[in-house]
Amino acid sequence: MRELKVRILSNTTVNMAAGLLKDASSALGLQVDVEVGSYDNIVQDCLKKDSVDVIAIFWDVVNFAADLFWRFDALSESEMDELAEKILGELDIVLQSTSDIPLVIFNLFTFQENLVAPRQAVLFDGMCSRLNISLRDHAGANVFIISPRDISSRLGGSRAVDWKYYHAFKQLWTKTFLNEWSLLAAAAMLHVAGKMKKVVVVDCDNTLWSGVVGEEGPGGVKMSIGQIGAEPHVRLQHSLSKLGKTGVVLALSSKNEEHDVRSVFDANPGSVLSFDDFVVKRINWDDKVENLHEIAKFLNLGLDSFVFIDDSPFEIENVKARLPMVECLRFETGEVAEDRILARLDALFTRGRITDEDLQRTGQYRDEARRTQLKAEHETLQGFIRSLNIRVRILSVTPDMVTRISQLCMKTNQFNLSTKRYSEADIQAMVENDAYMLRAVFVSDDYGDSGLVGAYILKQDPENTILDSFLLSCRVLGRTVEHAVLDSICKQLMQQGISQMLIEFRSTDRNAPLIDFLESLGINVSNGSQNPSHYFFGSNSPRIHYFVEVVDEA
């Protein structure tokens, strides 16, 4: 995995954040190089055009201007408006100049109300609201927002801010605060490294609802708005519902009888979530580790893309010990604990711009369940594939596809030739460069439309035509779609009089399906000592066999 370059910019002293962010990132399996920019130089540092993957910004009101701390009570409304206009102008510059950065972590503007008289506090809160509205309105899909006030509320003001250190070193935030901030920031960086979380598996009793259905019965548990004791669980349901609508797969793992669980949903028509909102259910008395393995196998996704939520310390520790790649969140009631887990959940599923494919994903996995059932009815894989009537369309990449292609580059791991993590700006630049040829792959069959699920990038240099990237969603693997796309590439090259291409391959611990595919074509990559490695492949290779219909509309 490549190292992410992270730059922290601030108008106060936050040097401690660098080490804390590295520790939090390492705990999530991320390799990061963190640097802290020049003190109080946010705008100028944002204008730098050197390569960076993540920028994190602390822009604290208390230090908007020199000696502002001592002048808060004396500021008039007109002076405050003038200050706000200045910051709004600078904010616009910062957002525009960082629009091509894969991820910008931005703290909401926050004012410590105990610094001034109540009337002035109202005015400063109004200014912060004005700045934050502008931030939210103009932030691109690459911006992830953290609320310092929410963190401070969870910790208590005295554990978040240290005025002694602020006056001595301009260090406003405590180590405790910065540690909480780092946990959220590191989680938000997962998708930049291609380690995007995709599935959340949740328990039922005392997690989705209050109570134990086996003891209290379907009508005795509380999970709907307005029921006493249900509020913490309703908050979790709202968060899960929001994630489900953005393409995150929701699954259940509960030690219960399935008819009891279904009855709870039937008895609570006012609940935020329905039984059918969960794509996969493992409701049984089996070990939850085994259930997680089964869910991963069904979805054809790696367990490192899973988040597991349960109220039981035993279940959480069991999964942590045996499946360390799964992110575990223990659900506890109480406003502080709830705020922490919901903020963490939001950060873990940071994904940038939401595409049409994201919005359709839940339905696509239900379609996949029908295909799985059909597969069991066929004696041969070839017969199963032919029965699906798979149709593959290959199109030139247009501007409306750029976001989705970048998303595939960022999150596809199993079938990813080079694992290059191209941003939207990278993809757009290649679309506009004649040295590159980009194609999008759409797949559908009699059971549903999977949408834009793959792409490839050919690069022409003075000596070779290079297959720079070739990637497909795991949802369509194993049906000879990959063979059909490669055959289309070869036919296209032959039409141009190009007899061979150079395949650039980077081996990782997660793209074994790609290795199997290449070796099925006669390319021996298992003993390769170089990474990346390069292999020539003839355009007229006879080794490509597939059982799908291909339409090249490029």
Image (cartoon, helix red, strand yellow):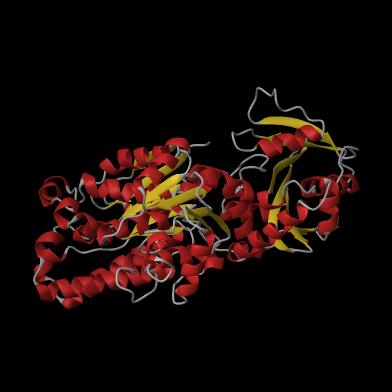
Give the residue drawn at x 72%, y 31%.
Answer: 534
Q: Is residue 422 visible?
A: no
Front residue of this view, candidates 87 and 7: 7
Q: Which of the 4 quarters of the picture holds residue 460?
A: top right
Q: Is residue 62 visible?
A: yes
Q: Residue at x 40, y 50 (%)?
A: 55
Position above or below: 297 against 443: above
Left or right: 465, with 8 as reference point: right
Q: Residue at x 13, y 46 (%)?
A: 165
Question: Residue 356 is drawn in which quadrant?
Answer: bottom right
Q: Position of residue 135 (x, y in %)?
A: 37, 67
Q: Residue at the spot x=52%, y=49% of the render?
A: 196
Q: Is residue 520 left or right of residue 246?
A: right
Q: Position of residue 361 (x, y in %)?
A: 61, 62
Q: How many marks?
A: 0
The C terminus sits in image quarter: bottom right
Residue 241 vs residue 284, the one in the foreground: 284
Residue 219 x, y percent position in the rendering: 41, 71
Q: Quick one: 301 or 222, which is closer to the camera?
A: 222
Q: Position of residue 348 (x, y in %)?
A: 44, 52
In the image, is 270 to the left or to the right of 383? left
Of residues 410 and 241, the one drawn nearer to the viewer in this rendering: 241
